[in-house]
Image: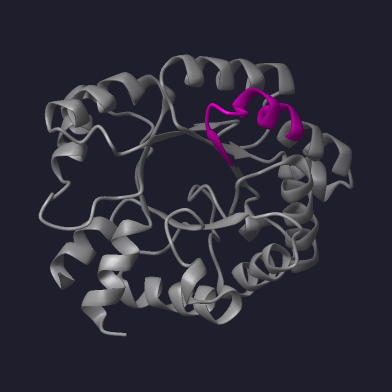
Amino acid sequence: MSDVHDAQLALACLDYTRLQEHDSEDAMCQFVAQINTAYALPAALCVYPQWLQLTRRELDNRNLQQIPLATVTNFPTGDEDLTTVLAQTREALQLGTNEIDLVLPYRALQLGDEQKALEYVRQSRELCAKKAKLKVIIESGELSLSQVRIASRIAIAGGADFIKTSTGKVAINATPEAVAVIFDEVAHSERAVGVKVSGGVKNLSQAQLYLDMAVNTMGGAWLTPFNFRFGASSLLGELYKVL
């Protein structure tokens, strides 16, 4: 495939992300303004819950109502108690999110508490049912590859729509080794589960690595925004340069 084709595909699979700790209305408006309607639209925009309504307003003002909104819960540490996480989820749904990116309590998983991790996914899934997609962030860079496999199985068992690698807030984010494990689990799942590669994908060549992995593992027909996403903030502009 050509670079232009791959850039178009990566753009269509992009969760265009703005998760800065201290932001402003002007910054969020500028974030939305970066979308160039001459090309494929991003698969979703991912923002903090407090910016959901403003982001939707800005999209509506540009007649981009078709772009879904995603937000995060238990983010970024994965250490919130379950009651708080479920409250975050309810609020986000009320604010109009279409997708929830939940951070798995991966530190509990590291200590061997698989049941706690499963409950976070299951109960979040119950709230999201028929309302929003659930993407489970396993924070793969903080886990061993065997733990990445366990976390992926937990996400699948709990009802996740996507397994997402990373928050982008730790030292190591997406890696080909971890993504290969996730793809292996998704390929052997009894139900359809997507994959979101997030953290450290900043240019087309990096994106192409994961696009190739997806095709080689799952097949070309699988590689659509319904099954595969990138989570990135700077990738949008780099793809525009190629296009």
Q: Is residue 11 left or right of residue 133?
A: left
Q: Position of residue 213 (x, y in %)?
A: 53, 77
The colour scheme is one colour
Instruction: Answer above or below: position of 44 versus 7.
Output: above
Q: Write the start and end of the magenta stretch as one range.
A: 122-134
Q: Position of residue 197 (x, y in %)?
A: 50, 60
Q: Is residue 198 left or right of residue 46?
A: right
- Considering the image in quadrants, where does the N terminus appear? bottom left
Q: Report if residue 41 lies within the magenta region.
A: no
Q: Is residue 53 left or right of residue 224?
A: left
**Rendered residue at 65%/50% (across/down):** 138
Instruction: Answer above or below: position of 92 versus 3.
Output: above
Residue at the front extreme? 221
**Rendered residue at 55%/52% (across/down):** 166
Q: Is residue 38 left or right of residue 117?
A: left
**Rendered residue at 43%/27% (across/down):** 97
- Considering the image in quadrants, where does the C terminus appear? bottom left
Q: Position of residue 215 (x, y in %)?
A: 50, 77
| Mark count | 0
Q: Report if residue 123 lies within the magenta region.
A: yes
**Front-lying residue, 63 or 106:** 63
**Front-lying residue, 35 or 85:** 35
The quarter holding residue 206 reads bottom left
Q: Position of residue 170 (x, y in %)?
A: 54, 51
The quarter holding residue 133 reads top right
Instruction: Answer above or below: position of 59 versus 220.
Output: above
**Rendered residue at 73%/50% (across/down):** 156
